Amino acid sequence: MERFQIGIIGAGRIGRVHAENIAKFVPQMEIKTVADPYMSPEAEEFLRGLRIPNLSRDAEDILQDPEIRAVIVCSPTDWHAEYVIQAAKAGKHVFVEKPIDYRLERVHEAIDAARAAGVKLQVGFNRRFDRHHHAVYEAVRSGRVGKVNLVKISSRDPEPPAIDYVKVSGGIFYDMMVHDFDMARFLAGSEVTEVFAYGAVLVDPAIGEAGDVDTAVVTLKFANGAMGVIDNSRRAVYGYDQRVEVFGSEGAVMDVNDTPTNAVYYGADGSIASPCYKIMWDRYTGAFAAEQQAFAEAVLNGTEPLVTGEDGLYPILIAAAATKSLKEGRPVKLSEIEAI
Amino acid sequence: MERFQIGIIGAGRIGRVHAENIAKFVPQMEIKTVADPYMSPEAEEFLRGLRIPNLSRDAEDILQDPEIRAVIVCSPTDWHAEYVIQAAKAGKHVFVEKPIDYRLERVHEAIDAARAAGVKLQVGFNRRFDRHHHAVYEAVRSGRVGKVNLVKISSRDPEPPAIDYVKVSGGIFYDMMVHDFDMARFLAGSEVTEVFAYGAVLVDPAIGEAGDVDTAVVTLKFANGAMGVIDNSRRAVYGYDQRVEVFGSEGAVMDVNDTPTNAVYYGADGSIASPCYKIMWDRYTGAFAAEQQAFAEAVLNGTEPLVTGEDGLYPILIAAAATKSLKEGRPVKLSEIEAI
Amino acid sequence: MERFQIGIIGAGRIGRVHAENIAKFVPQMEIKTVADPYMSPEAEEFLRGLRIPNLSRDAEDILQDPEIRAVIVCSPTDWHAEYVIQAAKAGKHVFVEKPIDYRLERVHEAIDAARAAGVKLQVGFNRRFDRHHHAVYEAVRSGRVGKVNLVKISSRDPEPPAIDYVKVSGGIFYDMMVHDFDMARFLAGSEVTEVFAYGAVLVDPAIGEAGDVDTAVVTLKFANGAMGVIDNSRRAVYGYDQRVEVFGSEGAVMDVNDTPTNAVYYGADGSIASPCYKIMWDRYTGAFAAEQQAFAEAVLNGTEPLVTGEDGLYPILIAAAATKSLKEGRPVKLSEIEAI
Amino acid sequence: MERFQIGIIGAGRIGRVHAENIAKFVPQMEIKTVADPYMSPEAEEFLRGLRIPNLSRDAEDILQDPEIRAVIVCSPTDWHAEYVIQAAKAGKHVFVEKPIDYRLERVHEAIDAARAAGVKLQVGFNRRFDRHHHAVYEAVRSGRVGKVNLVKISSRDPEPPAIDYVKVSGGIFYDMMVHDFDMARFLAGSEVTEVFAYGAVLVDPAIGEAGDVDTAVVTLKFANGAMGVIDNSRRAVYGYDQRVEVFGSEGAVMDVNDTPTNAVYYGADGSIASPCYKIMWDRYTGAFAAEQQAFAEAVLNGTEPLVTGEDGLYPILIAAAATKSLKEGRPVKLSEIEAI
């Protein structure tokens, strides 16, 4: 088995998740260095437990290291594009957390830099690797549903994020539905051309005061003629709820919400199934590992990642269009956004 | 048990369905007369098999009969409002098939006539009585889902209707999604205030040539702040597909598509469940019987029907708004339609 | 459509169920007479509501009536065989409630009488006509499960019968598991050759004092080499629980417990599905109607009923063997019983 | 986090599974040495990939190592008891693969040795740690099902083992149903007192020629009055099928067969769900990891393991009783076996 060395920039929550998954499940990648200017003692202890040899406060220790062949970028979002560009210039393959950036020109620069350097660029839309959603994707790709007519996605979180995060995240379309925009493109096998958004503040007035909505329904038109619909809520009291469905000329394929166990209790008041997941990291454990395995294979085999830089761009464009649609109360074409 | 006599105007398919259900399942109602100017020999034989004493070619035999206390109107749509008005004037309670009329002023006249006469007017939105959808409704009404945030409805037919029907039906929003507009109001417990429609011709180009779409996704705003989304397709190869879901502050409630049996086969290629219903009359057998039972009870108890004349009006308004939205490519407020 | 006249002997609960189902759903059969020496006023009112012309206190009014072509025997069990024999001698086809008799020689006499007279004899094992169980049967008969290896049946009642009934019913194997013995033979497509029974008093000590058990697990050997297992409980707090499963060389087929609706509520405490049926008549509504439709067709088409007289005999033999097995603590061959 | 060093005796398939799971998921245990007299080059490479420092051909390198606090015994079954005894004498905690031994006196000696030495002894009944089965167990333990009346277990393998294995394994009750005997005791919370077995050769005549059966149904009596039933088949064409159910005075709890994904395809021929697992290691991945995590916690916290030495003994006793029952065609009390 061929192995190569990598570095991880950023030792926050998601950086540690990737480090742990790579250490445990991706023998092709050996983590040589994790760099974070503000690495906490807890992060350090955790990473040492994974037997990672170098812990640094300087990303240059990764970018300048000729032994390191690929970089996992888990920095704050503002720095994503910068590190992608620097890693690409250093000839290193890059896995970058989503979103690449909220500024479209920076996203383009990052994609261009990777293309110019001839390195792989994979974006962290982990849900494509979830076993249930992926099985839906495979059924669509196999032709079993025929020509895609409709993509339906439900995505609900157990709890809203902190208000401070809501204020800077760009809003529900950028920080939450962006995953579903990616999933919609992935399942439809086509680009979104137009978006119409409804949104409302139904969960917490403070979210409205922060300038965002907490519940949204967005309809989509795709270039291949299909339509899509996505609903999001910041709070489902029953926990994480993630379902996708594709309806086409030859059938439909859908998954149901994943639960920790399938045991069911039958009592005098009805049958009661397992509660849903309450924590995102539990719900998508396998998907986080699988996206890193796929990245390693793309690097080693020279194949295109399942989530490319362009796949990182389009959901941002759709988020921009949805935001504009909600503000202006009309359907917005993606071409209006590209024009910006 | 108190019983009363009724007459049925119209001996077409739906007239016979109601006649059979009433004869078998609604002992409170005794069908005295069925009238249809074009009654076929088959209809006659069928109705005689139900032991209905009078078969007539003249609706006046019902409207003028002082023994008949209620009328079931199953005439062609163009005559619905007219018969409602005449029956109301004759002091008879009325069950009328949906839609009351495509012309809004006629709908208003029918409703006004029933109100003025003090008779019950129930409209044939049978799906409200489906045991699965009704259980969803009951869960919402009981408060278990809390404040309603979102209503989601999927409704797909196995096959498109004949093109000749498509040409005169008023289009998919009037002849198909009108059921879902009713269901959406029913489940949300609130009026629709705005509509946005996407539609496309994905099933059969001939439907497009007839001026209609065959696939549509409509998003709704309700007065209580909730949102809704409905998808329709004229053709699901796997059969009739009808699902509803309500998501709220305290939980969600949803049904799955009903199937003839729950037997599942496990073989080398996976597990294969019962095929879906392919025929609407099979799918909603119980609902057709239940709506007549409810009508009988409303008449006998003097209570308001579960589907009132107003419930017959609003789905038509929403259909008008959806049609306008699709045509003009923008969200349309219901107030724009009322203004007409 | 060809029609024929029938008589019903017995106007108790099951007699009225059959009368109602036949009146509503089996247009081929016209109920001319219902006879019961102890017909209650309630029964009379109910039957008059079904427009049955003759209500009598003398079964001879049916047996001697040359216009009556078939008889539905719903008398007390002690009289089942007697009426089958008399009806057969009168040249009338017979549907008889299960069991034909608890005394094996009487069962044989009844079967012989029908055979000698050349009339159809159908026994009231209604569960064969349940849509879910029947779909399992069809899958087995179609060859999809291959050679049958194992039949599994769960059958649990919401509440035990009255102790007075337990004392005279012959015990759990005769009054409850007899249905499952029939189902096991039906699904296996083979005769039971040996039985082993475990039983216990876990629900109500009074049942033990009456000489019976309330919980039992019985394993079966079939002539074709397959095995079977049945579990029964007199009380499942969650309601009626009826599931069947057939496992074979090419796959398995099974149904899940039927419930009134498939709506599911998702709340903070998990997902809660519809409670199970609590009343047997609700659970098997469709099956009672379907068995009468099948009887009418067997009579009119001259075909063998789906449940023959022999099908009425074998479950009694198996019940006898199971009773003996439980008493003697050893497996009992059916041949030991036949020898009696 | 407290950590301790361990050794693994045996580098065959199951030894490597445990080594990998411990290395990835059980940070409390550090594998210092793996010993196997016949260690293959593949095993060596695999174990080096896990960064295990010492690979040896002599178990003494583990047993004599004072730094090693616990031993994982994955040797051939004949040597299980011997290594348990030696490890216990060396003061080391022991995890031993099931069965401890086929010879009951050796099982007793192993258990006695661990008790005398005051070390923990955990047996490898991994299914207790499966998330679905464990949720059933938790529901029973919580009291939600009340007093246990019935335990039902289905356990079917995709393919029979090699005939050479069948010849030496002790038979289906020892090598396959032993897992279900353990599960039955675990779920019932009571000891089995009597067993009755039916078995047949329905899958492959060669299995019969080797003196075994390939399909079996076993009924159980428990000391607490409950009953149990287990069915096993060596070949389910649809894959691994594992379901458990507990029925009691206050309800029932059951799981359904686990599948790789919950995606369902709806096509013209019905709805088709994900195929079942075909490989045992895939089906029970999580359970193998969880049993080692539990072992580590038992060692560190000084608590009793979830699967004790006695838990390793009873399933062997039950297997002996089932074997005897099948041979003699009668129910066999466990006391008859203990007497041996």
Image (cartoon, coloured by chain):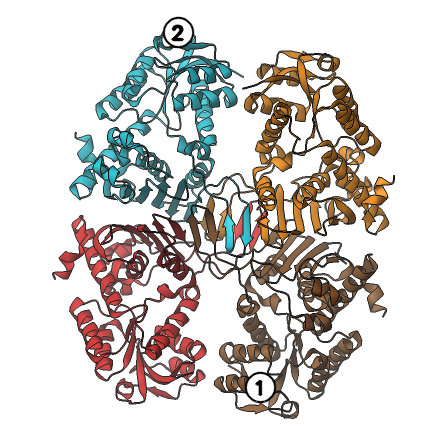
Chain colours: A orange, B brown, C red, D cyan
Q: Is residue C221 above or below residue D169?
A: below
The residue carrying pointer 1 sits among few (fewer than 14), some (14 to 19) or many (20 or more) residues within 10 Å by Cα, namely: few
Where residue D146 sits, quadrant-wise, is top left
C304 on left or right of A183 = left
The residue to which callout 1 is attached is: B40
Q: Nearer the viewer, residue D198 or A5?
A: A5
Q: Nearer the viewer, residue A58 or A136?
A: A136
**Residue sitting at 34 percent across and 38 percent down?**
D184
Tag shown at residue D65? 2
What chain does badge 2 belong to?
A: D
Mark 2 lies on a secondary structure that is loop
Q: Is residue B62 left or right of residue A193?
A: left
Q: Quadrant of the N terminus of chain A?
A: top right
* Above or below for A89 versus B108: above
What is the C-alpha distance between the residues marked 1 and 2?
97 Å
Where on the picture, by quarter, is residue A7?
A: top right
Q: Chain of mark 1?
A: B
Q: Residues within 10 Å of mark 2 (few under 14, many from 20)?
A: some
Q: Amino acid at mark 2?
A: Asp
Task: Give the quarter of the image for residue A117.
Answer: top right
Task: Name which residue lies at 45% across and 50% down.
Answer: A266
Give the vertical position of A218 relative to B66 (above or below).
above
Q: Residue A202, image x and y in percent?
A: 74, 48
- Horizontal and vertical percent position of residue C52: 40, 85
